[in-house]
Structures are given as C-alpha cells and as structure tokens.
Amino acid sequence: MTAEKSGTTGRRSGAETRADGTGAKDRPDDTAGAGPGNDAPGADSSGKDDTAATATRAGTTKRTGKAKRTGKAGRTGTAKAAGAASAADADADADKTSAADADKTSAADRTSAADKAGSTDRTSAVHKAGPADKAGASAEASTGNAAGARDPGGNGDAGEDRVTVANAGARDKADAAENGDTAEHGDTAKKGGTDGDKPADPWSAFGPAPEPVLGRPRRAVRAVGRFLVHEWTLAVVAALALAAAMTWPTLRYPRHTLPQDYWDPSLQAWQMAWSGHILRTNPAQLWHSNTFYPENWSFAFSDTLLGYAPAGLIGVGPEHAVLRYNIMFVLAHALAAFGAYALARQLGAGRIGGAVAGASFAYAPWLLAQAGHLHIISNGGIPLALAMLARGHGWSLRYGYRPRRRHAGWAFAGWLVAAWQLSLGFGIGLPFAYMLAGVVLVSVVLWFVRRRKVKRPFGRRLFLADVLGGLVFAAVGAALAVPYFKVAELHPNAERTIGDIGLYSPPASGFFTAPAESRVWGGLHEGARAVLPWHPEMTLLPGFVLYALAAGGLFFSVWRVRHRIFLLAGVLVTMALAMGTRFFGGRFTYVPLFDYLPGWSGLRTPGRMMLWTTLLLGLLAAGAVTAFCMRVRELAAERVPPWPGPWLRLATLLPLALVLVEGLNATPQPVVPRQPAALRTVDGPMLVLPSSQNLDQPVMLWSTDRFQPMVNGGSGFTPRSQAQIREATVSFPDYASVDYLRKIGVKNVVVLRDELEGTPWEGMLDRPVDALGVAREQVGEAVVFRL
C-alpha cells in the first residue's frame, strides 16, 4: 500500500483510497475548525489523549474488517484518479496481514492528523454521508467544494475528487448496513438498538418518517404557550404585579380611599366619570360640564384625562368613580414602567438594564409627591410612543440605523400612542408635543441631506405612515387646544405670569430633597423640605441610586461616548428648565419658552420637567447596568460549568433592587367623605355650601350619580363668576343673596351642616327664612333651601 502526502500539510491525495477504506474526504482537515462532535480544544491541548483515542479507533477498525470497506470504496470510482488503488484494495481483501499493517500505518497517520485538526472528522464525515445521499448531488458537490476550498495544497481536481469520495462514503455506509458490517452495526446499536441486538431500520436514512401534523387544538395550545412565555408578555405581567405592590395599599380598599388626599383625586375621579357619562348621553356637550354653573367650557378649566374616557363608560356614582380612579392609578404606574422598559430595550439595553430604566422612571421618589395628580403620574405613553417610533424607523441608540428593521405599522402606532398621551392633559403633554416637533424637524433635514446619497432613506411606506400619523397627532392636539384657547380668552386670570412661575420654581437643593411620601428619605429630609417655599412641587429627588448608576454610565456603558454626552446634555438642559426662573432668572432657558411657545404660559409648575430628567438618567443607568451584566456573563463563561453562580446572578439584580427600595412609598390613603343623601335627590342648578377650592372637589365627586348642574367646582384657577357667587352668599339666607341666586338660575342650596365650622358661612342655619319665600327642609345630614 502506498500513500502520497500532499505538501507540508501531511494530507493524502484526494484521489487515493487508504487501506482503512477512507478517502481524502475522511482525512482530518488541517484548516477546519471544531465541528459538531469534535473536541478541538482537547485535541489542541493534549496530544497524548488524542493519540490514545485515535489508536483505539484504529484498533476497532482493524477488528471490524475495514479492509472490506476499503474494497467497497474502491468500487465507487476513485480509481479514476489512481488505478493502483483498486489493486491495493484487492490485495487488502486477500492478505489480512497487509491490511493489519496498513491499519497500523493509518492509525499512526490519523494520530498525526489529530494533533493538527482533531481526530473525529472522519466520524463527522460518516454521519454526513447519509444526508448527503438524501440531499442529492448538489449537496455532495457543495460538500466537496467546501472541502476543496479548505485545502490550500490541493490541485484543481481536488474538489471533484472530494465529491467522488463523499459519494463513496455514503454508499459505503449503506453497503456496510446491508452486509452486517460490525463497526456500523455497533454504531447503529448505540443510537437506536437495544444492547446491540436490534439495529435501527437502515432504510430510515433514505426515507425518514414525516413530522407529525398537529391538529388545530394542539397548534392553538402551542401558540398560546409561546405567547405566555414571550418577553413582552412577561414584561407586562411583571409591570402590573410591580405596580400593585409599589402602590400598596391603594388597592386595599379601592372603593373607599384615595391616595395622598381626597381633593385633587376627587376632581380627577369626577373628570373620568364625566367624560364617560357625556359620551354616552350627549357628546356635543363634552366641554360644558355640570360644574362651575353658569360657566361654559368648564371641562377645560384643568387637564381633562380625556384619554381615560373609555374607563368612564363603566360604572355610575361616587363609589365606582373612586374604584375607577384607583385602578387607573395603578395601571398608570404599570404603563410608565413598561413604556420606559420598552424604550430602553429598543435603544439596545439588556433586560435588567431595561428593568432599571422602567423602575426608575415609574417609581422615582419625586413622583411620590405627585400621587394626587393622576395626569402627572399618567406619563407612560411618552416612552412607549418613543419606543414604537424608534422601532418603526429601525433606529437604536446602540446599533444605529438599520433599514431592514423598519416597520411602518409600528411608526403609525407610535403616533397614535403619542396622540393618546396628549389627550390626558397638556401639563406634561405640551412639552412632549414640542419635543416630537423637534424630532420631525431634524428628520426632515436628514431626509433632504441624505436623499442624494440614499434613495428614499426613510422608505415610501414609512414616510406615508409618518405623514398620516403626524397629521393625526396634530389634529388631536389642535382639537384639544381650541377649548383651552377659548378659556384663556374668556378668563384672562387663568393665564400664568412670570411671577406665578417664580413661586413654583425650585432651587438646586430640590434635586436632592425627597418628599414626605418617601418611605426611605421622607423623614430624613424633613429639615430640607422646611426651607423650600412650596415643597410639594419642589422636592425633585429622582433617587440617589439613579444618580450613581447614571454617573457610572458616563464611563462604563454599552452606549457610545457621543451618545452618553448627548444624554448628559439632555439631563442638564431639562434640569435647568425644571428650575424655572431660579436658573439665572430663566432668561436663557424657561422665559423664552414662556414668551414665544404657544400654550407654554399655561404651565404652572416648571418642576414637572423633571420627568424628562428622570427618563434620561434612567437611560444612562440602563447602559451601565447592561455593560455590567455583559461583564458578568464573560466571567461566568470562564467557570466550569459555564453558568453564573448565585452570587453573580444576585449581583446583576442589585441595581434594580436598590432603585425599587428608594421608590417605596409612605403615601397616606384617606377615606373619601361619604356622599350626602341630599345630592342623590336634589335637582340642579344648585349651590352646595360651604364652598372653596378644596371643599368643592369632593362635591364634584358626589355629583356623579346624576351630574346635576352646580355652581361648585375646583380647578387650577377660580372663575370670577364663582368668586362673586361665594361672596354674595356669605350672608345667606337673606333677601340680597336669595335674589341674586334666583337671577342666575340657582334653584336649590344644600348646606352641609358638619362642614360649616370655621368657614364664612358659620351660623347661617340660625337665620330666619319665613319672609323670603324659601322652603327649608332637613335631608339626612344636610339642610336644603328650595328657592
């Protein structure tokens, strides 16, 4: 037996057949990497082990009659390349001693090859033979071409020779199965037989059993299972569970308590109830509510939460209104966490980094002071819309612009979510609208710059989705703005002044001061709050943990350096805006916006710009946490087995846990005053006394049974007509006050006996009404004067 070696690679000629029945295809490839089943690292590091393993396989081959397979390989046509191989095959069948010597030589050769490329390539080649036969000549040719490409020392015929050898190897496998070859029989027994007695069906390699066809019920069950374990399904469930836990005990008595106080929450519970009621009965009167009689456009006296109108369609009365408010309060926190998580993930953060961004955005300590302002808590549509728009445009902070990931549907959905967010109120919706306008302006500039280099850089469908979505957003904004401009025209005192902005502008110390509702920092920061002029709107701490993570994200992050700089610039700009007139008088920050941007003068509290600061800090923190988790995975890969230990896994969750701890609340949950029986029976227009900004808000909630027209109402400002009515009725009941009320159309006056003490109306029930033509009666705990 002769065997040529090709060059310095120690590779045998592809045209020859070796004494052990394998051709050049079976020879280990020096340039190939570790394939399936190959222990390349072991072969590279321990030559002795590889030599022993190869020698063992060589011995097995000698015992199982490799010489027979050598002869069969000779019949496959390799003799076209070297005729001497057929004679050698015949000699091998006749002379067992020569075959044994050839086996020993082959084993030694294979040992040498194993030191270079692993000794199990021959096994891989045998396994590939069956699929190659099934796939046809094209697969065989592809295999041969790949092998030829890997052979740096082969000639131009090497590829064809390897194809021939691959065909021979496949037929050898079949022949060995038919003739009861011992080695193949042993391999088959290992795979499918029982103790080597019952080999698998040899024809299964040529005609495998078809995949079972699942019925419709099983397909449905499988689809549901995939949906339940999907990342976004788990994220939604986690956001809901976390919201219920972090806002506890809001859902403990959801029909009877309200978070923080029962003044502004009562107003907003009435707003949702009114929008649902009027959409059922008379949508044309939406903006002319039953409060602030006889004023029109009264629904636009404050942010409306109009986007929650579908929830207002369910249930009637104060108890259902309180329940609805508490449910939406919890869902608003869940949406905020989910929206920020989705944005961070879309921009390229990992799961834990996204969770940190979501938790820090939804449960920042400064937001605990806003627990009574649902229109501020309801901010989740902002990051969610940004995430959808970024997804639709194929853009990521970490990976840049990827045109293949563009999706017009996601972009259009992002515009719809943005429009819904705007419908909840202009308090936080107006800055969001101007931010989106800036993004559109930058996008248009980019389109004009890149259109010469890249044809349709945004794509035609995506461009149409942006145009239609932008028009929908603009139409919603314009439709909502009309009533507010009408209110500003009818009530000049509703517009804010720079002096009003100065009263609510926080100092720099506010960024490090927590509100009293913070369980961790509330008590410790009591002294710092005492020096703030209006601490409910000036305690703006986003969290010390968030500050630390964001600072770390400036130096260690998955974001690029320029992106970190942009995020830091955004943090500083939004902080300067949140300070209002406290930052160098606001001459270069807040005042220009107040003077020139339409609607900006209606924003009373600049500190709510902290919402954007928190979001940007969360993105910086997400970049740092993601980089940290990647480093943990790298360390875990060095372990044996390569899996994170419990301490490493806990370390990745530590930032998230610390952020959540800082967000724990000590928010009070006062019981809502019970609705007087008189408000369920008395018709309007009516006046409930005593009347004031805070006292009128529960009265609005009590009217959700019948929505009678009433003078009472609470909002961000007091209309002049309401102030005049309150002043005129201080002496009620007397001739002047009764006559005034009759002229403006008030028919009934309800006096709450238990609320009179300490108000200007104290003692009014002792005054006579006999000469006034007024009927007086006791209805439960209230006294009703019928005019």
Image (cartoon, rainbow, N blue to C red):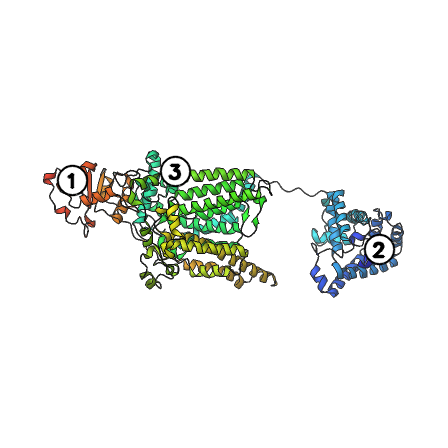
Three-letter amino acid code at disc 2? Ala
> Do the numbered discs 2 and 3 sit on residues whose CB atoms are within 8 Å?
no
Q: Amino acid at mark 3?
A: Ala
Total label count? 3
Q: Earlier in the sequence, mark 2 or mark 3?
A: 2
Relative vertical location of residue 67 with respect to residue 645 in this rendering, above or below = above
Q: Earlier in the sequence, mark 3 or mark 1?
A: 3
Looking at the picture, how far across and down is residue 121, in whole percent?
Answer: 74, 55
Residue at image position (24%, 43%) is 720
Q: On residue 479, which mark appears?
A: 3
Q: Residues within 10 Å of mark 3 (few under 14, many from 20)?
A: few
Residue 316: give x, y in percent of width and height.
32, 40
Judged from the image, the secondary structure of the residue bearing numbered disc 1 is: helix
Marker disc for residue 565: none
* Crowding at mark 1 (Cα within 10 Å: few <14, some 14-19, many 20+): many
Q: Please name whichever residue, 149 or 693, is drawn nearer the observer in this view of the structure.
A: 693
- Would you say 505 lies left or right of 161 here? left
Pointer 1 with pointer 2, Cβ within 8 A: no
Quadrant of the rendered structure where residue 630 is? bottom right
Name the spot of residue 735 as percent of width and height, x first: 13, 40
Whole-angstrom CA distance, mark 2 to mark 3, is: 88 Å
Cα separation, mark 3 vs mark 1, equals 40 Å
- Asked if 415 appears above or below 117 in the picture, the reply is above
> Who comes first in sequence, dot 1 or dot 2?
2
- Is residue 245 at all visible to an observer of this figure? no
From the image, which quarter does the C terminus lie in?
top left
Question: Mark 3 falls on what kind of element?
Answer: helix
- Residue 738 circle label: 1
Determine which residue is flagged by label 2. 19
Badge 2 marks a residue whose secondary structure is loop
